[in-house]
Amino acid sequence: QVQLVESGGGLVQAGGSLRLSCAASGLVFSGHWMGWFRQAPGKERESVAAISWSGSFTYYADSLKGRFTVSRDNAKKLVFLQMNSLKPEDTAVYYCAAARSFIDSVQPGPHEYDLWGQGTQVTVSS
C-alpha cells in the first residue's frame, strides 16, 4: 500500500520549534520530490517547502526562508520539516506530498504532487 504518514505536529508557543516527519511506504522514495504544504482555516493550501530526491535541491516559500528547513533520509524513507521561530500565523494543517520526478533538479509544480498524507495539525499560540 502506497502511503505517506505525517507526525510531529502539536501545540507550541510562539518562538518555539517543531519537527515534522513524514514516513513513506510502498513507493520508490528516491525517485520522488517530496513537498510540504499547509492549509490554514479559511485559506487555500500553500506550498511550504520541497526537496529533490537526491536532497541536493530544495525550495522554500519566500516568507518561510530562514525559519524552516526541509531534509530527507532516503534509506529510511523519511522526510522532515524543521520549523523554528514559529509564529501564530504558521498555525495550519501540514501535509506531506510526493511527486514523481525523472530529473532531480526540476522541481515539480504543485499539481504534480499526486500522493498525499492525511496531515498533521500545528498550532502556535501567541
Image (tube, rainbow, N blue to C red):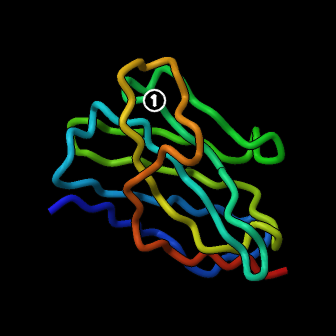
Above or below: residue 33 compared with residue 36: above
Answer left or right for 79 relative to 63. left
Expressed as whole percent of the image width and height from the top left, the position of residue 63 reads 83, 46
Expressed as whole percent of the image width and height from the top left, the position of residue 16 reads 70, 65
Exactly how many numbered labels are in the figure? Answer: 1
* Residue located beneath label 1 in the image: 52
Above or below: residue 111 compared with residue 54: below
Instruction: Tell me where residue 54 sits by quadrant.
Output: top left
Instruction: Tell me where residue 6 sits by quadrant.
Output: bottom left
| Image quarter of the C terminus | bottom right
| Image quarter of the N terminus | bottom left
* Residue positioned 81% across, 73% down in the render: 88
Answer left or right for 101 relative to 121. left
Q: Secondary structure at mark 1?
A: loop
Mark 1 Cα within 10 Å, few/some/many (few <14, many 20+)?
A: many
Foreground residue, 76 or 47? 47
Answer left or right for 55 relative to 16. left
Answer left or right for 7 relative to 106. left
* Residue positioned 47% across, 48% down in the render: 113
Instruction: Tell me where residue 122 sits by quadrant.
Output: bottom right
Expressed as whole percent of the image width and height from the top left, the position of residue 41 reads 74, 82
Foreground residue, 81 or 52? 52
Above or below: residue 88 compared with residue 86: below
Expressed as whole percent of the image width and height from the top left, the position of residue 42 reads 78, 81
* Residue positioned 32% across, 38% down in the render: 73
Could you tell me the amino acid type at mark 1?
A: Ser
Above or below: residue 21 compared with residue 80: below
* Residue positioned 76% across, 57% down in the render: 85
